[in-house]
Every structure is written in structure tokens, then in C-alpha cells.
Amino acid sequence: MAFDDIFPQSLREAIDGVIRIPSYGERGASRFIYNLLKLSPQEREEVVNRLLVAVQKLRPCGECYLLSETDPCPVCSNPKRSKRFICVVEESQDAYTIERLERYTGVYHVLGGRIAPLEGVSPQDLTVDKLLERIQENRVKEVIIATNPNVEGEATASYLIKLISSRFPGVKATRVSLGLQFGSLIELSDELSLERSIENRR
Ligand SMILES: [Zn+2]
């Protein structure tokens, strides 16, 4: 009997489905599916239903690209948030980390990643054009770059600061000085050091 006759087709397709998610290889995807299948039939259906609801409801905001159930997102549609201050982050989860502090009163811009030449990610693959458009249209005062404190995050920040300073000389472009260990991610950071670094950014 050949292996293909024994290995269930639906299991193969489920694993191949998870592999399509960035950063999941055969091992990670297999572990995810096998662990999911350890749950009771009722529980696993519940988990999959929640995933289904999330993927159906969540879309990037048409303005800032923050994942949201509404478009515009709750930040962009809040009249109390100043559109003249834009905090640039790599991913939605970075914005949520800052949002949890309940201190920042501007809006966000989610890049959708960071510039990584070795992985073939260039500024054109990110939402940089839309960022420039927003700076122009909203008479932005300051752009706060809160990319992750690793090599690619720093390079992305330098690129954006240069670009913004040359296109919009009147706009302040600042790098949030994250009080973090080099290489760690914003989402893993302790909230206080992030809060302090936002306050101390000048
Ligand atoms: Zn938004």
C-alpha cells in the first residue's frame, strides 16, 4: 500500500492550507493541525468557527490599514484623534500594543511589514505611497516612526525619515526611541518602557 493511500487527503489539504500563512513551514503547520485535532470534535469546530468569523470580519482600514471590523477603523473615525499626528508601525499588533497604553491621541499608519532587501521586500511592497498621500492631505505636523528595534526596523525608519524630510520639509519625522533590547519586538515589550519612550521621543 502506498503512503498516499494511507495519509488522509483532507489532512494533507489542511496542512497545505496552513503552510500558505507566512512563516509556517511543514513542521509548524503539521503541529498546528495535529494539536487542533486533539481537541474534542465540538471544541475544534468552535475554534475553526472563530477563525472563520475573524477572517470574514477583519479587513485593513481603507485609510490607515489597521485591521478592523469597520472601515474606517475606530481610530480614524474618532473625531478626538488628531489626524495631524501619524504613528507608523509595521503591523496592526504593534498599533494595538501602543493603543493599550491609552496615551497616544493621534492616528496610525500600518506599513504591512518592513523593508527587507534580503527577503525581497522593498518600499513598493509596503503602504508607503499611501502614507505620503495622507501626510499631504491632512497637513500632518509629525510622523512618529515606531518600527521594531531590529536591523530591518531601523533601516525602514531611516528610509522613511529621509523620504519624509525631503518631500515635506515642514513635517517633523521622529523615531520613537524604544527603551528595549536591540532585536526585541515591540509586541513583546514591557508597556512602561514603551510609554516612557513615547513621552521622551524628543
Ligand atoms: Zn484607520
Image (cartoon, helix red, strand yellow):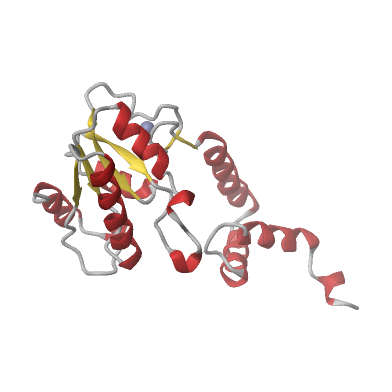
x and y percent of residue 7 in the render?
79, 69
User: Which residue: 30% across, 66% down?
Assistant: 150
Q: Nearer the viewer, residue 174 or 20?
A: 174
Q: Is residue 33 above or below residue 103?
A: below
User: Which residue: 57% across, 57% down?
Assistant: 21
Q: Quadrant of ligand 1?
A: top left
Q: Is residue 66 above or below residue 187?
A: above
x and y percent of residue 33 in the render?
62, 62
> Which quarter of the figure has residue 155?
bottom left
> Which quarter of the figure has residue 88?
top left
Q: Nearer the viewer, residue 198 or 193?
A: 198
Q: Residue furthest top?
A: 79
Q: Is residue 78 above or below residue 155?
A: above
Side (left or right) of 102 relative to 188: left
x and y percent of residue 56 in the render?
57, 36
x and y percent of residue 154 in the render?
28, 62
Side (left or right) of 177 relative to 73: left
Side (left or right) of 162 relative to 39: left
Q: Residue furthest right?
A: 1
